Amino acid sequence: MTPHTGLPRTMPAVVCHGPGDYRLEERPVPRPGPGEVVILVNSAGICASDLKCYLGAPLFWGDEHREGYCQEPVIPGHEFIGEVVLLGPGAGEKYGLAVGDTAISEQIVPCHACRYCRRGQYWMCMRHDIYGFRRNTFGAMAEYMRFPADALNYKVPASIPSDQAVYIEPLACAIHAVQRGEIELDHTVVIAGAGPLGLGMVAAARLKNPRLLIALDLNDDRLDVARACGADLVFNPGKTDVIREVNQLTDGYGCDVYIEATGHPAAVEQGLRMICKLGTFVEFSVMREPVTTDWTIIGDTKELNIHGAHLGPGCYPVAIDMIRKGLLPMDRIVTHRLPLERFQDGIDLVAAGDRSIKVTLEP
């Protein structure tokens, strides 16, 4: 093991004990086993899924139809960046990491043994250990964090500031969603939602160079940032009949690709009405409650391609490169940087949604 002098025995950490019950506690500083990495966390993002977990969404805590995903007590946080401080035997060679490097780990730690992992579809792993929700993978809202031996880790260029590098995880998810849209050069693409993920989707879709790229959001300030990310047009559905606008822009056909990144059921119905026949609908959001709609639109009326998008498989190197090249207005996306002890203020900012885009904690 590579030694790191001065590492404390305990650290401050946010601990989830249940919906609405998050506490700042002292926890043991993790030590690495074989193939494992310990980082000093520089920055941890608060995701919309963190908020839904905090608010008690059934996906995370269960209901009469399913078992909950969150295993409390757990340290939350799956968006992060940090400095390598300890390397277990073999970890440095396996990942090309050294003490002092900046490192990130994909949000899922796959089992490498289930059917999906064996097929290379590791992001759908049956064990599905995502940092910050499972006891096997404590998250980043703490001073230090451990990457397990099965993790997928990357070295991040030191030239990328930590307050920008923390956006790698949501950007990787956004890139994967855009890839699922199968965008062509003559397509009209609509991205619903200009939050942290939607903005990343706009920037990634811009690289596909569609004929027309449109962003939708109820917040005009976020729409201004969407323009800076590459949107050709932006519309506020609270002020504009966006279905009518898109139809007029496409000779009445509708958009070719619609990517839903709002997390609101109304955006699903909006997309099904807005999209053209034979179009591709990409659903990304983690919904707080089940969504119902007229499935006849999907089948008999329009024969749509419905694609899900989950996590950011294979997209971390692309996300790192996009940020390194300055392809996103990061100073406008990361709006709030708070100390760890103000985690509740951070959660409240994300819940309000009117004054922030990406909120981060800096232990």
Image (cartoon, rainbow, N blue to C red):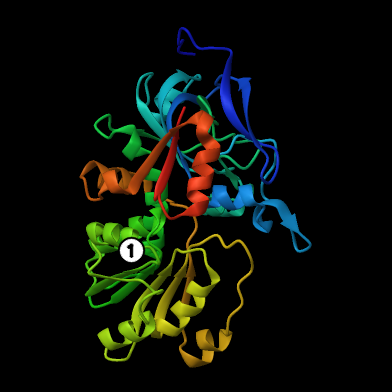
Along the line of sight, which residue is nearer the eye, 234 or 256?
Answer: 234
Look at 40% across and 57% down and name the residue there: 195
Q: Dot 1: what SS? A: helix
Q: Give the vertical position of 6 relative to 245 (above or below).
A: above
Look at 47% across and 70% down and name the residue there: 307
Kind of residue at disc 1? Asp
Q: Position of residue 79 (x, y in %)?
A: 46, 41
Name the residue that disc number 1 marks: 220
Look at 66% across and 44% down and name the residue there: 20
Q: Give the vertical position of 70 relative to 208 (above or below).
A: above
- Disc 1 residue crowd, few under 14, some 14–19, many 20+, Cα 10 Å: some
Residue 118 showing in the rendered view: no
| Side (left or right) of 206 relative to 102 | left
Residue 269 showing in the rendered view: yes
Along the line of sight, which residue is nearer the eye, 288 or 87?
Answer: 288
Query: In which quarter of the view is residue 111 placed?
Result: top right
Look at 41% across and 61% down and name the residue there: 177
| Side (left or right) of 126 relative to 163 | right
Query: In which quarter of the view is residue 245 placed?
Result: bottom left
